[in-house]
Amino acid sequence: MFGGRDDSGNPLDVVQKYYPETYGTEDMFPILFDPATGEPIAQFVNAQTDIWSDRYMLIDYDWLPQNGPCANIPQVPDRPPGGGGGGGQNAAPLNPLPEPLYGHAAVALESKGNIIPPPVWPEGPYCYVFILGGITDSGVPTNAMRWFNVWQEPPEREEGEPRAGDYSLVSEMPIERAYHSAFVTLPDKLTDEPWRIVVVGGFDRNGNYISQVDEYTFDSVNNPVMGSWRTVASVPEAAAGQAAGWQVDDRGTVYRQMCGRTIDGYTGSVYDVLENGSLSLAPTRLVPRGWVGATQTKVYNEFYTPGGDFYIIGGLTQMGMDTIVEHYRP
């Protein structure tokens, strides 16, 4: 979790990581085994609960098989939520953002499960997060795209001395954006389909809603860090706080903008944008609203072509805040 605002509306540079209970060591049983191989893969613990922390905690490997009469001797000491890491080492604090930020978007590119065959060292495996746009403490939207390596352990340093060295500036978007949407399209080595990040909607430094759909294409599937931007198209209704996603159908890869706040109010329109820049207005109209939460689940047909089920959650309508959850299947 990167940045945001506190109860007083002040922008934050805080970075936190979520640790599920299987990172703990208080109890040795039960151990979870991989049903395919029979190898241990994780361990439930007795007293430690799921936690959020602003520290990089080293993984505890006490579930690994041991030599000797006891198969599960703890290898590392127990640790409190904010304390030391595995092997008795102190967990380094996560580096904060280079500057306070809110209204931004973040997407992850992960090799595991997404690339066949997966890349091997030194090109992989990897899990990178890209942080795009947002409003800085100056109150102005930025066009920066920054790179964060999820698996890179921060250097050891004294408490209170975090450095903002983890967030490399990769590129600049064609336009500053805040309260926009971003999503990742998956690569395919067989068809030379690259990783892409697509950015939709938002508003610029002058408060104008943005209509253009921008696409960042990475140069490498095995090491997706550098690439180039292009503007794919502009939708008829510029919007912010919208939902967005993608799918593959008989037209090819389709980028989709759904709902959002426009200059004329809230919209329920769904726009399909093809990679060649052509546009179409979907026949289905959703509940007009903006500032929504949204997620996408991928479904597969008999040809294992990714499709898309979209869920639009909450947000604001002309009547105020709502609790509607809407399922959209194109």
Image (spheres, rainbow, N blue to C red):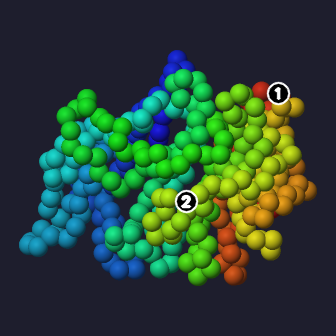
- Mark 1 secondary-structure assignment: loop
Where residue 258 appears, as percent x and y from the top left, is 78, 48
* Residue at figure coordinates x 40%, y 39% from the top left: 16
Amino acid at circle 1: Met
Rendered view: 265 above or below 256: above
| Location of mark 2 (residue) | 227
Looking at the rendered image, the quarter that the C terminus falls into is bottom right
Residue 330 vertical position relative to residue 69 in the rendered view, above or below: above
* Residue occupying image coordinates x 30% and y 75%: 39
Side of 165 where 101 appears, left or right:
right
**Which residue is more in the foreground, 78 or 201?**
201
Front in this rendered view, residue 178 or 61: 178
Residue at the image position 91 percent from the left and 56 percent from the top: 283
The residue labelled by disc 1 is 319
Q: Is residue 33 visible?
A: no
Q: CA distance from mark 1 to mark 2?
A: 43 Å
Secondary structure, mark 2, is strand
